[in-house]
Amino acid sequence: MSKKKRKEICIVLAGEAGQGIKTIETTFASILKQYGFHVYATKEYMSRVRGGINSTEIRAGSEPIRAFSEHTDLLVALLPEAIDHLQHRISTETVVIGDSEAISHPGMLDIPFGAIAADSGGKVYANMVCLGALCAFLDIPADFAEPFIEKQFSAKGSEIVANNITALTKGWEKGKSLVKKLPFTLDILRDSAIKKRLLINGSEAVAMGAIAGGCNYICAYPMSPGTGVLTAMADFSKTMDIIVEQVEDEIGVINMALGAWYAGARALVTTSGGGFALMSEGLSLSGMTETPAVIHLAQRPGPATGLPTRTEQGDLNLVLYGGHGDFPRMVYAPGDIEEVFALTKRAFEQADAMQAPAIIMTDQYLVDTYYDSPGFGTLKAAQKHAVMKTKAGYERYALTKDGISPRGIPGYGSGMVCVDSDEHDTTGRITESSMVRKAMVDKRLKKLNTIKQQTIDPVITGNAAAAIVIIGWGSTKNVILEAMSSKQLESAAVVHFPQVFPVPEKAADLLAKAKHIAVIENNVTGQFADLLEKECGTAIKHRLLQSDGHPFSLETVRNWITDFMKNKRG
Amino acid sequence: MSKKKRKEICIVLAGEAGQGIKTIETTFASILKQYGFHVYATKEYMSRVRGGINSTEIRAGSEPIRAFSEHTDLLVALLPEAIDHLQHRISTETVVIGDSEAISHPGMLDIPFGAIAADSGGKVYANMVCLGALCAFLDIPADFAEPFIEKQFSAKGSEIVANNITALTKGWEKGKSLVKKLPFTLDILRDSAIKKRLLINGSEAVAMGAIAGGCNYICAYPMSPGTGVLTAMADFSKTMDIIVEQVEDEIGVINMALGAWYAGARALVTTSGGGFALMSEGLSLSGMTETPAVIHLAQRPGPATGLPTRTEQGDLNLVLYGGHGDFPRMVYAPGDIEEVFALTKRAFEQADAMQAPAIIMTDQYLVDTYYDSPGFGTLKAAQKHAVMKTKAGYERYALTKDGISPRGIPGYGSGMVCVDSDEHDTTGRITESSMVRKAMVDKRLKKLNTIKQQTIDPVITGNAAAAIVIIGWGSTKNVILEAMSSKQLESAAVVHFPQVFPVPEKAADLLAKAKHIAVIENNVTGQFADLLEKECGTAIKHRLLQSDGHPFSLETVRNWITDFMKNKRG
Amino acid sequence: MDKSFEFAFDDIAWCPGCGNFSIRKALIAALDELGLDKTKTVIVSGIGQAAKMPQYLDVNFFNGLHGRGLPPATAIKAVNPDLTVIAEGGDGDMYGEGGNHFLHAARRNPDITLLVHDNMIYGLTKGQAAPTTREGMLTPVQVNGVKANPLNPLAMAISMDVPFVARAFSGNEKQTKELIKEALEFKGFALIDIFQPCVTFNKTNTFKWFKDNTYYLDKKYDPEDRVAAFAKSLEEEPFPLGVLYRNIGRTTFEEGLEVYKKNASPLTERKADLKKLQSIIDSRR
Amino acid sequence: MDKSFEFAFDDIAWCPGCGNFSIRKALIAALDELGLDKTKTVIVSGIGQAAKMPQYLDVNFFNGLHGRGLPPATAIKAVNPDLTVIAEGGDGDMYGEGGNHFLHAARRNPDITLLVHDNMIYGLTKGQAAPTTREGMLTPVQVNGVKANPLNPLAMAISMDVPFVARAFSGNEKQTKELIKEALEFKGFALIDIFQPCVTFNKTNTFKWFKDNTYYLDKKYDPEDRVAAFAKSLEEEPFPLGVLYRNIGRTTFEEGLEVYKKNASPLTERKADLKKLQSIIDSRR
Ligand SMILES: Cc1ncc(C[n+]2csc(CCOP(=O)(O)OP(=O)(O)O)c2C)c(N)n1
Ligand SMILES: Cc1ncc(C[n+]2csc(CCOP(=O)(O)OP(=O)(O)O)c2C)c(N)n1
Ligand code: SF4
Ligand code: SF4
Ligand SMILES: [Mg+2]
Ligand SMILES: [Mg+2]
């Protein structure tokens, strides 16, 4: 039987926290990219620091890869429990690789990680043995990989470097000897242009986008999966002018961020659902005082503590409606690394311009995922900071046509900048006049109109005129696109919403024209579908929903869409 | 010109905080009721303790009265600023009454409150002079009023009582001498059955309903207009077994309440919008741990601090969607005192039975309003406390058909009661199994179905088959009904929603059958109309909205409805 | 432009006779006498009667949420250290709803002055117990009298090493003014707990009660001994007034910020450096 | 039924070598040795590594939100004073997110035992500074080292008159167990701050560091002198271990509740009295 030739491969590494999977993953991903392969990596992990069972998926191929696939070509099990944990991903096509000292599985390719590592200087080198074998499987020469190892461990001294390289080489040789046992051959094209591309995960992209948007202040209380952005900002603060402050609680966080904006900084807040819930009152303060705010919310499954390290898109309703009273807001939902960057930057520009809160919604899946990205283009300075020098008699809440009053900051000019959480008059002082109240309610409402005019349109792929419309938001963007064949795209429009609120006006048209509408989102009720129903007046019966803490897989989406399209059209 | 004969009167008292308006109001309302008149009272006041300008409206008549009227027959101005403050309520039909020493207004009836009070023992008695005059205007003998004064002041000694009565009598005589100057004569029927009726405001009714529902624990952080319920419960705790605790902040409040329920108490929480926002995370904890919670939310205008002592219905979205993740909840929106009582009781029963949070939404207008109420019928014990004695091996989250697991409490039986804010297995212990996760998400979702089945149907008045449907929720109930003529009710259905979530299934039918739908609610975007659109799939274009901090008046609603019905039908 | 912080608000919402009026006078006098530039002064407050203070001064203000004065105040000072920042609020505002922020502001030590109006009651919400309400007081909510220990703000502040801890009595405007001046000139987090009679809701701790139950620390008192200061802070009825504790030299929050290590100009005056961002991005290639 | 609180959880989520294992052993031993009825014992915790504790005991538990252990614990004890109630969590949980509840629980003085695992770090969220982290520690967020003062939980507790204030070190299981027993038997709010090495994220304050930087208070030490206790609580490196402060006789929260003045039976066992409600309603006629 001639072997199948494959242009891409999906490798899954599974082991316990602390076994060094992360090192394999990041080094291997770099190697793949520098070798000229397209690469994609994502992970799932438990809410614990050691032990348990975590896994990382690495896909490499000739074409750009952007989505999580359940299909597994190689499963590297560093722990017996890995087999059980990933049972559902082991098909007849899956090759399990493990150390037969510890693990047994029918048809398993045995690599004595332990013994080879011990030979190379100690058990800790097992992950390098693994890395070596992986390089061999992908036909990457060991000496191509060596410099990466040197760079990684140089600080630890030459002996450590040497041992790691020994382990890598031995692993590579072992791997080489097993290649023939693989049920497929690989034929991944190399493209040297890929080397120039970026490996940046979602968290880092938020931080970079924020800085591009002028962010110079981050405050947060740690909360998975929102913490990554705090850590990235802290890292970037080593070379850039950014105040980084960990606050005592999330209520302190949002109020501190509003203080920072008030004084003239551009502050970012990062959190997850529970933290965002605690910020609800502060969100309302942003709305009332018209102080800009930018909040990054990395979603995880709720309610309450839920599954702290897993993924979901279940906080949309909270983001849309959290906070008491009526006030305008903007909600962005990037679908990939480039959008994360661009929309975070935009969130800063728009929050500043509209003097209203802007929320960027990601999820654990998106912040922990990366792939070779073409990058963010030439950096352009953020839209001019919308702050004016005040004159005596300055009125913070002057009534204007579009509801937006020129914003001053204290100490810049001779005016007084007075902001008030009570209803206030144009000067910012407390009032109980119902006339003034009406004017101010009206002013805040007007801003929503201005905001609406600047909403980002949905992105349509496929046949824009098709009767079938498949909708996603946020992190479902690429899994939907990759799941669909080009044939399917001829008879369906795939619509991704980078901004979910205000719902772009085009949405209503789109839905009105469509005959068969499906929404795909990672929560149990279909919160975005509900929003579209409400705003567009079209019922959306077909929903692919999920709530088990995992990202949508290509396979799930592909099967569902194929079925949906068949039944609707047939 | 023969004078108009009137069967009802609307009196407005206006003065500054601290001038004793409240004493006039409560005493006068009691007198009116005991005299056999129907009576209604409501007030509006500033967020300050002394000074400013507040007003109270008292309506008396031959028929039951339940709504706020802007039309003013008598305006008693205790302060010059009163005239300005209530300018919009002074029509050609309004008689202004004041002390010409301090106030002048064309056509004003002069009562020298100051001088008569001074004659009676001191300036402090001015409010009794006013009360006396009011009795005279309504043809209530002074000696009928005297016992009320005695009762009120008996604790302060006989001299004070005597002075008050002197002031009352002199005021009465002065009033009598002016009756002929009134542009109308009053012909209010007396009905001695009215004496037996109750004068209870919205806050007290919440407290009473809670106790009827088995409430034995209240914790809260003071926040207008939610504080009244805390004060009422504290008052009732003087004779009843109720733990009353003022907590350090609202986050402590909701978490403490959940602890109390967990241990077997039935706890009530009372707050306003900002406090509720702070409880969002705790709400989600109630959802996840399936610990019952009952929250009374008295709305005031937002966002942020807004107008602390005024009224609005702007927190519906927050209540519907606050808290992260998906979990079931119940939202009640009583429209009058009797419903406040009944629905608060029901909230306890349902929270207990469904092991989910129940929210009772009132507003400042409703909690501060009262009228002669027929009462709450014979008190029936609350539905049996849904708590079981546990056995060894007890599973707090046992999977059942309807998603509801029998609830144990610690120390009652030999089982362990384990509740967890993380995703958990049936025993209540933390898990990361996606199978278990799915089962638990499913379980919580099932409860929503059970809850739906027990939703209270909307109350329809008028012609249930009419093409015109006029919808309200919460405190708009009576103003809509009173605003409509019996003629109008022949061709329109007035629909009041005592429960707004889950939206009762009948709502969709109702809207589907209707041709002309209007929603009346006291917020600027039409939050309930939006909810109906979303849940029923019917667009609702006609909305009477308001957001100036005041309750809807009869006049506003009447004009709008008349116009709406004309244009739709003509 | 008039340099004074005085502001003619047409209708101050406090009750006649309230101690807040004296605090307002003392505060305006302190600011005026120090010759501070009002365009470079910000008062941050929460919600309550005390927290209305900035509304009645000619000054920049951020009148935020109940209990949440300190976090924005900290950020404002950090973002622009050229500003003079005052946080102000009631005993409920700062020690009740905002208690956690107090603890952690103490740890950070921003160079701001915190004025707490301690009327031992919730004024604006009409007379419930505050954290500082004395045991046994009857209120409409504490119908059997307050049971919890009153919070001792000075002891707590000293335990957190707040570097300037003082108590004033609004009844003595001059001493209050002098203490405010001292606090404003102190570098670091400076707390003044100001006894303030609430004439409407606190009929126990009246002007007379405060007068009869307080005394001024004499010149010999050494506020730099932390343990002695703690002992002093436990004294009640009479309560000592004046600076109870002072710890000169604690690094402030702003001083500790890396952004000011090599460049003293306020963060607000700096431009985003896109080149540095580009090089961070490029490091991911 | 087995009386021990021991529970065979198949997979404890702590890192091998973590101090939490010793605390768990000490806690189980303390509960067992006191012969407490586990069906009448409740552990309330927040979120964090420490807060997972109740999951690994055979006991009733309320494992609530991060930082929010004390309010439910207070209510549980109030509603059913027959229960033994323990609140447990990490330094971030109880002094960071939950700081305000700590202050006000101290004021109320519920008869509960509070165990705080003080590892001077945020464990579960992977190594950010906790309120008790010592100055200068480098973390992925505090990249220039921690600048804020570490919170001194004992000094703070003494300033709030928490009536039982102790410090333990997980490395000494026996002493930890004895202190837990003492705290459980003490009537009133009893805090034990337990030094606990986090082997994964805190490479500074290791087992050895704690061992080298602590000492046991000797028998002569008198914990009933509050000012002396305060002075003692300020001692650092070495840190005193044992009961630093004790104030016997403060009324507890439950004792102060009116519902227990004439009737000692737990609130949970009482029926609603509709007649009394009716008479309140009738009084409005
Ligand atoms: C989140 C929130 N909870 C409650 C309130 C209601 N509230 C306003 S002021 C106040 C307390 C007032 O007491 P204090 O802070 O001592 O100020 P004072 O009026 O006594 O000066 C409260 C509870 C609020 N505005 N926001
Ligand atoms: C509202 C909220 N904010 C943040 C978190 C994330 N979080 C979980 S545990 C934790 C801190 C852990 O530190 P600590 O309390 O000291 O416990 P340890 O893990 O060190 O025992 C944080 C920040 C959360 N669960 N909820
Ligand atoms: S209520 Fe008390 S604190 Fe408030 S203004 Fe009046 S006297 Fe002052
Ligand atoms: S991270 Fe630290 S505290 Fe948490 S289990 Fe591991 S060693 Fe213990
Ligand atoms: Mg106060
Ligand atoms: Mg910790």
Image: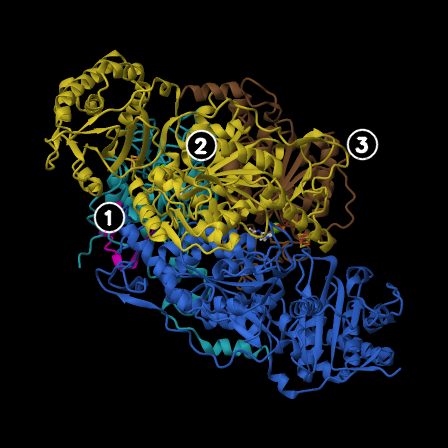
Chain colours: A yellow, B blue, C brown, D cyan
Asked if labels 2 and 3 share a chain, the reply is: no
- Kindly identify the amino acid type of the residue bearing the numbered disc 2: Leu
Closer to us: C119 or A238: A238
How many numbered marks are there?
3
The chain carrying label 1 is D
**Residue D263 image position (x, y, % from top left):** 40, 69
- Camera-near label (2 vs 3) is 2
Q: Name the residue under label 3.
A: C1
Q: Nearer the viewer, residue C213 or C79?
A: C79
Helix, strand or loop at mark 3: loop
Q: How far separated are the C-alphas under marks 2 and 3?
A: 44 Å
Give the image quarter of residue A259.
Answer: top right
Outermost residue, top side: A158
Select label 1 or label 2 by which is in front: 2
Residue D28 is marked as 1
Q: Which amino acid does label 3 sit on?
A: Met
The residues colored magenta run D26-44
How many angstroms separate mark 3 from mark 1 (CA)?
Answer: 71 Å
What chain does mark 3 sit on?
A: C
Label 1 and label 2 in one chain: no
Residue D130 in view in this figure: no
How far across and how far down the image is residue A496, in percent?
A: 45, 41
Question: Mark 3 near mark 1, Cβ–Cβ under 8 Å?
Answer: no
Q: Residues within 10 Å of mark 1 (few under 14, many from 20)?
A: many
- Disc 2 and disc 3 in contact, CB within 8 angstroms: no
Query: Label 2: few (<14), some or many (≥20) within 10 Å?
Result: many
Q: Position of residue D275 (x, y in %)?
A: 47, 79
Ligand 2 positioned in quadrant:
top left
- Tell me the tag on residue C245: none
Q: Residue A230 carries which label?
A: 2
